Amino acid sequence: MEVDEENPPSSTPVEASSLVDDGQTVVPAVNSTAIQPIPPIIPPVIPPPVVPPVAPPIVPAMAPIPTLPTPPVLRPLAPLPIRPPIPRPPVPQNGEMRTSDSDSDDDSDPGRTAPGSTQEYEISEESRQVRERQEKAMLELMMKRRASALAVPTNDMAVRARLRRLGEPITLFGEREMERRDRLRMLMAKLDAEGQLEKLMKAHEEEEAAASATGEEAEEEMLQYPFYTEGSKALLDARIDIAKYSIVRAATRLQRAQRKRDDPDEDVDAEMDWALKQAGSLALDCSEIGDDRPLSGCSLSRDGKFLATCSLTGVAKLWSMPKVQKVSTLKGHTERLTDVKFSPTDNLIATGSADRTARLWNTEGFHLKTFEGHLDRLARIAFHPSGKYLGTTSFDKTWRLWDIDTGVELLLQEGQSRSVYGIDFHQDGSLAASCGLDSLVRVWDLRTGRSILALEGHVKPVLGLSFSANGYYLASGGEDNTCRIWDLRKKKSVYMIPAHSNLISQVKFEPQEGYFLITASYDMTAKIWSARDFKPVKTLSGHEAKVTSLDVAGGRSHSPEKKFKQLCSRFNKSVLLVMADGNCVATVSHDRTIKLWCSNNSEQDHAMDVD
């Protein structure tokens, strides 16, 4: 203990200075402190040396070393206790805890628990709503997972039956098959989650098993298709008359086709070449202003002596041919006219109008009959080849057949899902074709009333139809700017003509032999196409607005029987060709003009016919 008490004075600055003065280093001085005999060396003789100024530079160099630990490196870790509130992010977001960010605040509040326990925190209304939405989303997700694991029938009839068994509506407004199936799936998942599905399905299966034994025969009777609606006696008589008429016409057409095939003197290719040459030489012969407003339809009489036109003024006019001079005016409709047609057998004219009626006129301009019954404006109209019946189409999604003699509505035919626009009758009189805004072409058997063909191919509304004289070609044109040729034997489209740069308003086969086809379009032109390969033959350009309608005049002989006899009595091939083709085309347009296109060779042909 004494030694320890004596050591402190040995460490005085005087001793240190003496050591430095003797030329010894500081380290030996440190070692000398541990030895007891050194104290006698401390006489006060050493104070004068100048060593003290030397010692300070050594001490400052050593001073920073101890000072480094003084600012503790762990000082930034002091706020670490604040981190425990991190597990409770919802609280600061909702604005509930805007103070007490330190540990002292948490410890000083007795009403709060440790930071890790968030269950006892107060929850705002907004936070509660957020949690409810999250729980609802989780329930929906679990419901969808459960629904995806359920077996749902893929047949729509089975889906409807199961919905009915579950007491749900079998269909909703605007609901499609896949949507109906998804609704059944979600319903079954909901019942499964509630534990009621098995119970309900078992009860319904028992009821079905009990009812199936007694109701099988009744169901078979109910599901018999197709079903028929009983027609009137007048319709039955009309069907019988049409059947008799079509049998004679079809037999005559087949005899002519067989004769052309077997007779070595018949050269069909030469006839078609001549007809196409005639069509290629068509030129503008006459142009006349037809009305004060745009023209909507035109039709040539069976003998080619008259031309009928209609316009948006609601007035139809009759013109003499070939000079296009007005003969009479047909007034009576209260709305714009949509179409006009000449009868194929008599000089009778039928007009269709937006006032929902069709009217029958004679060439003197007298009104004969009115056909009323449509619920919306009319579109196109057409005469049956027998001349006894008139077909009308309407925007009420139906087309109707009328008796010319009595004015009675014989047939109201539904079947198109949208408005019906175009109609045409087969040359034999047995078939009718209709088209409309649903982009479909339907072929109907007038003898039975059945829809025998539904021709799909157009992608936009179909506006025009025409049967060929050969009996198996049907042409259609519409808003997709294309003309399609349908083969009734193959029941499909055999040609697709990209005919115009705008919609096709009407199509028409040459009426005698069907050697060429003419299309009218809103691109202000009418075009002629070969019926052999449907290549373009001639473009009739001259109108300054949309071409709305056209018609083709037949040859000088319009009855197949009479023409056949005349052809058999001739031996001059050129005369035969003249008889086989039409030589005049009439077009009307929104530019209010009537244009007549005639062949340049017509005068020569007429002279050859006289010879």
Image (cartoon, rainbow, N blue to C red):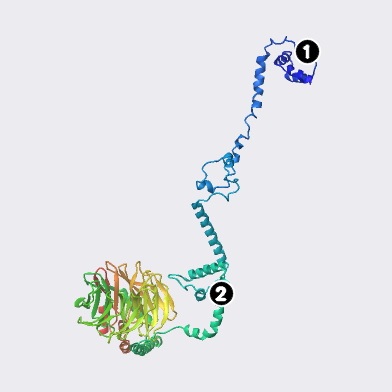
Q: Secondary structure at mark 2?
A: helix
The residue identified by callout 1 is 40
Residue 431 on image: x %, y %: 37, 83
Q: Secondary structure at mark 1?
A: helix
Q: Residue visible at 54% across and 77% down?
A: 204
Q: Are marks 2 and 1 in contact (CB under 8 Å)?
A: no
Within 10 Å of disc 1 (Cα), the crowding (few <14, some 14-19, many 20+) is: few
Q: What separation in Å lies between label 2 and label 1 (alpha carbons)?
A: 116 Å
Q: In the visual, does 606 lie left or right of 19?
A: left
Which quadrant of the structure image shows residue 300? Answer: bottom left
Residue 497 on image: x %, y %: 39, 71
Q: Residue visible at 65% across and 23% down?
A: 63
Residue type at mark 2 is Met
Residue 2 on image: x %, y %: 79, 19
In this rendered view, identify the residue nearer to me: 401 or 463: 401
Quarter of the image with the C terminus is bottom left
Which quadrant of the structure image shows residue 513? Answer: bottom left
Residue 193 on image: x %, y %: 56, 66
Tell me, for residue 201, which label it has, or none.
2
